Image: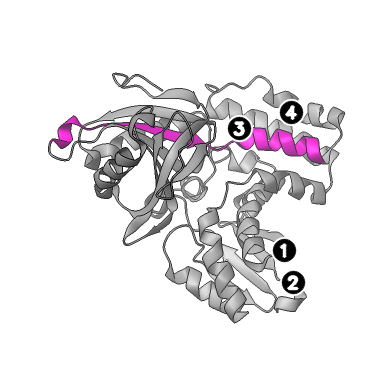
Amino acid sequence: MVSIDDSEVRFAALEETLVAKIRIHGSVSDLPKVFSELDGIVGAHRLGSPIVVHHWGVSDSEGHDMDVCFPIDMEIETDEISIDTLPAKEAMTLVHKGQYSEIGDSYTKVRLHTYERGLPIAESTREVYHHLDVKSPDETVVEIQTILHDWMDRFKKQLEEVLDSSTKEEIIVPLSALSIDSTAGDRQKALCKSLRILEAKTNEVQQFEILSYCAHVFPVELIPPMQDLFRKTGSVDAVIESMKSRGGFYPKNLRREGGVIYSEKSPANPTAYKDAKTISEQRRAYCFCPLIRDCIDETPELFCNCSAGWPKQLWEGILETPVKIEITKSLTKGNDVCEFAIHLPAEFV
């Protein structure tokens, strides 16, 4: 935990934490009531300040999903709450002081610090509420914990699963000099060198198996509603229309042509994409990945197998069977957009 007097962005290795938890769907204004409820249940077993896990991908006009957690010293037997363990994670942290309505500026500071190092950010964020003051909001103190996506760990693990140890070691050599404070430029150059070795040492099937595993984790909470809809209707079209009408991280640019669903990604930064003065600026604004967005033209095409892992998680969850994902367009191929073809198994066409 960082000092609450610290105003700088810091890297932190967050430890595994036993917590008492209530999941809600709403906004930060709902938290004081839930804190009070948890406090009455946990009592003397509470170990520290409340931790809230924000699931931004599960959102709508009413708010978003949040796991409201109290660290505890032992498991508590009760039906009123869940007992869970927050896993150990790496994060960039910053203490925000003042009104919560102004926390966006602090998040921007953390995000810029993280992206300057070429590090991808995970889908859920943690916040530690050292002091949430409704009556005197200027006295609020919230520690932002921006969780890092464990791309490099996933890459190394999957190399080990798919390839022999000597080939794996050869591929990761360019990455060995990187640290948490390496610049985005150094990280991107090292990754591109590693990808070129991977490309030379593997076939397309192996490349997909390795890199698609490195994708960001699709919010698991979003899959069951679509899975249930498909079970009831047997209609892929019904699922597509439902996803288009919902909030959160569901894809919106979808169309089906026979046995193939085409899914086109929207720009990562729509405003910068619209205001871009050059093709290079536009492509950078379109790309979601801080690992490559500053060196798209130099990045080997096979890298975008990573992005294909995102729709793979979603559609295999919905259909409950393996599906083939094809990258039909990508910035690394020289296209203006990224598009995936989800090939439906014959029995679903």
* Sequence-first disc among 1 and 2: 1
Determine the CA span between mark 1 and mark 3: 30 Å
Marks 4 and 2: which is nearer the front?
2
Q: Nearer the viewer, mark 3 or mark 2?
A: 2
State the colouring used for the structure image. Answer: one colour
- Label 3 to label 2: alpha-carbon separation: 36 Å
Question: Which three-letter amino acid code belongs to the residue tagged 2?
Answer: Pro
Dot 1 alpha-carbon crowd within 10 angstroms: few under 14, some 14 to 19, many 20 or more: some
Comes first in the chain, label 3 or label 4: 4
Q: Which residues are magenta?
A: 136-161
Residue at the extreme left of the image, as rendered: 135
Residue drawn at x 24%, y 36% as measured from the top left: 132
Comes first in the chain, label 3 or label 2? 3
Check disc 2 and report the residue beneath it. Answer: 345
- Mark 4 burial class by Cα count in 10 Å: few <14, some 14-19, many 20+: many
Mark closer to the chain start, 1 or 3:
3
Q: Position of residue 17 (x, y in %)?
A: 49, 31
Q: Which mark is residue 323?
A: 1
Q: Quadrant of residue 62?
A: bottom left
Residue ID for mark 3 = 188
Image mark for residue 172: 4
Query: Residue 64's spot in the image, x, y percent?
Result: 37, 54
N-terminal-most mark, 4 or 2: 4
Q: Amino acid at mark 1?
A: Val
**Left or right for 33, reference 269:** left
Mark 3 belongs to which amino acid?
Answer: Gln
Q: In the rendered image, which quarter contains the N terminus? A: top left
Q: From mark 4 to mark 2, how far is it between C-alphas?
A: 35 Å
Q: Nearer the viewer, residue 228 or 34?
A: 34
Question: Who's the residue at 62% across and 37% down the image?
Answer: 151
Please name the residue shown 77% across and 46% down the image.
207
